[in-house]
Amino acid sequence: MELSTIALAGANTLVPLQGGFSIELILLQLLNGLALGVLYVLLASGMSVIFGITDILNFAHGAFYMIGAYLALVVIGATGSFFVALFLAPIGVALIGAGLERATLNRIYDRGPLYHVLLTFGLVLIITDAVEFVWGGGQQLINTPEILAGAVQLGPIFYPKYRLFTIVAGGLLAVATWMLFRYTKFGLIVRAGAQDQQTVRVMGVDMAKYFTLVFALGSLLAGAAGVLAAPFLNVNPSMGNEILVIAFIVVAVGGLGSYLGSVIAALVIGMLQTIGNVLVPELSGFLIYLIMFGILLFRPQGILGSYEIRDEVAKLSFKETINPIPLTDRRVLALLGLLVLVPLGTHRVFSPYVLGLISLMFIWGLFALSLDIVMGYIGLISFGHAAFFGVGAYAVGLTTIHVTNSFVLALLVAVLVTTVLAWVIGALSIRLTGVYFAMITFASAQLLYQLSFTIPDITGGSNGLTGIPDIRLFQVIDLADPIAFYYLALVCLAGCYFLAVRVMDSPFGRVLTAIRESERRASFLGYDANKYKRRAFAFSGAVGGVAGALFVTYQTFVSPNTLYWFVSGDALFAMVLGGTGTLYGPIIGGAVLVGLDHVLSTYTEQWRFVLGIFLVLTVLFAPRGLVSIGISIRERIDAQRATGTPTAEEPVSGENQ
């Protein structure tokens, strides 16, 4: 159950007003919205503070909220006191946050935002599965303290004591945090660092220490929100995922790096969610996403934000270039020849399941390739590519159910729809950069995710789209046959890769690379940067749509989960794992991701824990991905030679003279 769906309790008989409402109902909703808003304040203010000084968009923030609830369970079990848990659990979360920051993020502050997003996403996987391993995946409940049980009369209504306590306790903590930043030396340094880190460093301040302290403070606030929310909700390992979305929305609306803006936005959004659930329940899920989308479009800095992305973190760029391998390369042709022969081993060497697994590798490789077109060649961070994957899947599913079971026609529909969708999103958002672009693409995908639940007559709602018939190629080949589908997926992957290489090796692609490296210089030379970026984004969306079309053909089922932000995170993982900006690297990364998924899930239910560690290590030690390992080895050899290290063929200085 989400925070926004907390039911009212303890209301007395309602006195109807015009339109079917009552004074009591309005008061209850206002108080409920205030309680919800206070929890959002604690969550979002911590995230905003972290971003303001470190430029880190912390995807692990929801996980710290979840840890707070579980640590409260431990403390209550040991002491029997909720109030002791409310004091100790957030401190525990702060210590965990500080430790993780020192071990991971502290090493990559000088890198682009892509690596920050991926590393914190890896922490989400690690923390969530670690919690599930220790406490299990089931629901757990923290009872309301006995002293706060029941309701108290406030004028014409009765309102739960615990919710009043939440408002007061959360409000006091928010005020204390504001005073910390406003009236202490710590706050002065943090605010100065958010404005100009270099100047603060020149004055002799160890900013690394303050980064850790700020991250710990943000984690503490998230943990406190988790403890306060626990009696409202059933505690479970996934409780941080949905609340993370809310935190992003609040931070975007209030203003990145603005504490006061986050407070105002949190209270407003809490009120709107609560009142919207009563007045327009069918639209309440859209309301906050629409607000976020509008704010990012027309005032990207938010209500009170004045934050400007520093130049060094505005875009993704690379110190070295790893060129794509053309499809006509002998190595690629040899690999394709080998892959063509693979189905011959079906039933002889391996089962059809293995062939299906390889087909799934092709699909995820294609999806990661679509993301690389945007991130590797434009330098923009898209965290909403699940939109194209999911919409492509739904387009094929709906076409085959209602129109024809021809894969070719359904694929054309999917490509057309996703191209138009990507063009529209690009037209609205392509002028933004850095985390602003990441957040607006994130909001776009989440809007579509919410839409899939709202129109069940079309999408099947939470049950997904079922009843998809057997899809045929040219009305002759049944794609339910694993061998036929394998060859189809291979042809689609090879064709899209060939097209991507040709496009990126064309004058159009070279302009994109120039824009990635210096948009100002490209514009000075007369190129319309936004036009080029829109076209590339539309092309990327079309390729993502092809991946989604293959996916629904593979499993003959599609659900809202294909649009969820975790899918975008997995695609990012695959892209970086293989090698961003190479086109072939993400294909390798997608295959490795599916392989790891299969192997790890065979041995443990907490396979994403290992996947998260793998992701964190990749970001820390192989940021250019698997394809860069050979290059790194050659660079080290060249560096050793450059320093004059003697080899077997080279006499040491002074010998034989």
Image (cartoon, rainbow, N blue to C red):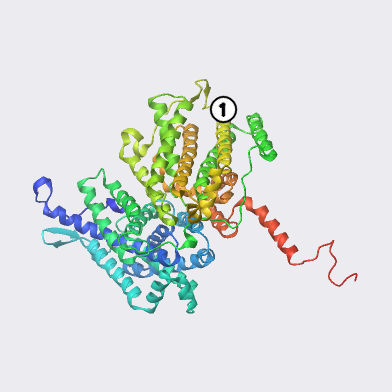
Relative to 384, is 182 above or below?
below
* Badge 1: residue crowd in 10 Å (few <14, some 14–19, many ≥20): some
Relative to 551, is 203 above or below?
below
Question: Where, by quadrant of the figure, is residue 218 drawn?
Answer: bottom left
Q: Is residue 77 left or right of residue 571?
A: left
Judge by depth and name the residue closer to the eye, 442 or 235.
442
Image x and y of residue 470, in percent: 47, 25
Question: Where, by quadrant of the figure, is residue 638 drawn?
Answer: bottom right
Image x and y of residue 450, in percent: 34, 44
Q: Is residue 151 left or right of residue 318?
A: left
Judge by depth and name the residue closer to the eye, 59 or 296.
296
Residue at left 60%, top 56%?
622
The count of marks equals 1
Would residue 237 be visible to someone looking at this image? no
- For this orientation, the residue located farthest to the right is 656
Secondary structure of the residue carrying tag 1 is: helix
Relative to 267, is 586 above or below?
above
- For this orientation, the residue located farthest to the top is 476
Image quarter where the C terminus lies is: bottom right
* Residue located beneath label 1 in the image: 484
Residue at left 61%, top 55%?
320
Image x and y of residue 49, in percent: 38, 66
Judge by depth and name the residue closer to the eye, 410 or 433.
433
Q: Is residue 134 left or right of residue 449?
A: right
Q: Say what amino acid the circle numbered 1 marks.
A: Ala
Image x and y of residue 419, in percent: 43, 38
Would residue 586 be visible to someone looking at this image? yes
Question: Where, by quadrant of the figure, is residue 618 drawn?
Answer: bottom right
